[in-house]
Structures are given as C-alpha cells and as structure tokens.
Image (cartoon, helix red, strand yellow):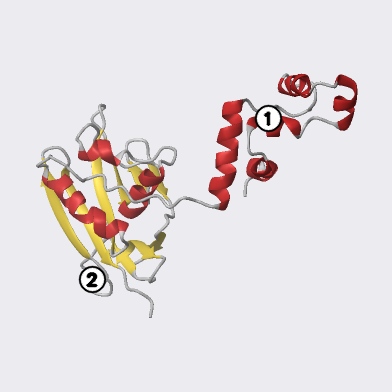
Amino acid sequence: MTGTIAQDMFLLDCPGYEDYLDTFVTRSDIRFIRNVRFCRMLVELGYRSPTDIYTPEQFQQHKAAVQESLWPIKKSTIFFSDGMKSQDPVLIEMANRERPNAQKMISTIIFIKHRLKTGFEISGYIDYEQSLHQANLQEENCTDWAAIFGERLKLRPKTTDLSFFDWHKGLVLYNESDNYLVQHDVHYGLIFMHKGDHKKVCVDIDKPEYSKNCTRSMHFSERYGHVVFYDHVIRKKI
C-alpha cells in the first residue's frame, strides 16, 4: 500500500465531501465561530490544516483509489485483435496467438527488427504476454496494441523489452520480464528461462537440448519484414 493510499484511509469514513471537511473542524472552531458552514469554508480555504485540502473532485478520486486498493474490481481482458481487418501475415500470426497468451496456455517471444528513418536497424525480443498485459492495465509507456492491430502504429522493440539491440549506437540491453529470466550460455548463446515451469527457450532452436521446449516459426510481410515467433507451451505444475 502506497503512502498516499495509507494516508487517505480515513476517507472511507466520510460519506460525502462535507463529512470530509468536518474531520478538520475542531470543537474550538464550533465554540467560537458558531457556524458550521463557515467552519467548512475556512477548512476548504486551507486555514485549518497544514496539508493540502482536496477539492470535491479530488476527494472522490482519492476515495475511489482507496476503495480500489482494498476491493479491486476485476477488469475483463481486452483482446486488441478483435475485429481486426488487416490482411498483414505477421499481424494475423500475432492475432492468432493473442488469446492463448492472455490465457497463459502458451508463452510467445517475438523477435522483430525495425528500420529507423536514419536507415539503421534496431531489433529485440518481446515478451508478448507481458506486453499485452501491460496494455490491458494501461501502464505507462505500454505498447498500444489496439493501434498496432489497427495498423495506425507499427510494432517496434523497446529498450524495456527482453532484449534490445541498436548496433549503430553499440547499445545492447537485456531485461527480466514477468515471464522470463535472461541467461547467457557459452555454448548455446542467448537463452530465456520461463519462470513458471523453468523450461529454457534457446534462440538457436536447433540445439537438441532445447528443441522440445518451443517451436520457432518465421513469417514475412511487406510491413514488418521477417518476424520470428518462439512459442512455448507452458507446462502446468502437478
């Protein structure tokens, strides 16, 4: 629970905005001023509290935040590819994998390249399920999948993805995701270990030790070029 939420817990005892203002009115105020409405006005103007006094709109927002922290409303999952009209082969492959990823039946890693206006390329590996989940929660800097499936935006790797490569700038980044740990093996190269079943997805799928852990497929479109999908069927713990 964040500090702001903890400080606002008392708002649950305030049915309305006037009740909130009354929490700052003292007995001395009532004794000397003898007018409750005037006492509330002084509070609202900031004369009775060293802290900032919420406006009616802020009161409702902060109270709602406290209620959500205690009794979160389960939001239904949005499937961004629903109603997609695009015939782009790569987008169709992403759409086919959206539901099984959201339902955690499979875990897909997408390897994609993007050509910048400068002519140089960036590339990276994307944890597809995590990216969809962040978009559902509308997290800051999340990928706008609705715009991608609607072809208003083009999917590109970000520095916060599982890996990000900008060879022109000499920038190479690796990040742990909700589903994967990034590992480097002297013999097998880049490996992603699934946190749920601890199975390893090797970028070089031809390595026999890891060939059964996922399937790799490559698809091409004029918009995206060649995109690689690593599909790992999640093994449920018994």
Residue at 11% of width from left, 38% of height from top?
222
Eye-nearest disc, 2 or 1 = 1
Q: CA distance from mark 2 to mark 1?
A: 66 Å
Residue at the image point whose x is 32% and y is 50% from the top: 126
Say if 128 sits above or below 38 in the image.
Answer: below
Left or right, 40 with reference to 78 = right
Q: Is residue 155 shown to the viewer in this render?
A: no
Q: Secondary structure at mark 2?
A: loop
Where does residue 94 sit, x and y in percent of width and height? 20, 50
Front residue of 17 and 180 = 17
Q: Which mark is residue 18?
A: 1
> Left of 232 or right of it: where is 24?
right
On the image, numbered disc 2 is attached to which residue? 211
Residue in the picture at 36% in, 46% down? 136
Q: Earlier in the sequence, mark 2 or mark 1?
A: 1
Where is residue 225 drawn, in percent x and y?
Answer: 15, 42
- Do we see residue 165 in this rendering? yes
* Up-down relation of residue 112 to residue 169 (above or below): below
Locate the C terminus and report the quarter of the image it occupies. Answer: bottom left
Query: Which type of secondary structure does the marked residue at label 1 adopt?
Result: helix
Q: Is residue 29 above or below residue 166?
A: above
Quadrant assignment, res 47 = top right
The residue at 55%/40% (across/down) is 64
Horizontal side of residue 206 vs 20, given as left or right: left
Question: What residue type is disc 2 on?
Answer: Ser
Position of residue 199 measured from the top left corner of the image (x, y, whole percent): 35, 71
Q: Residues within 10 Å of mark 1 (few under 14, many from 20)?
A: some
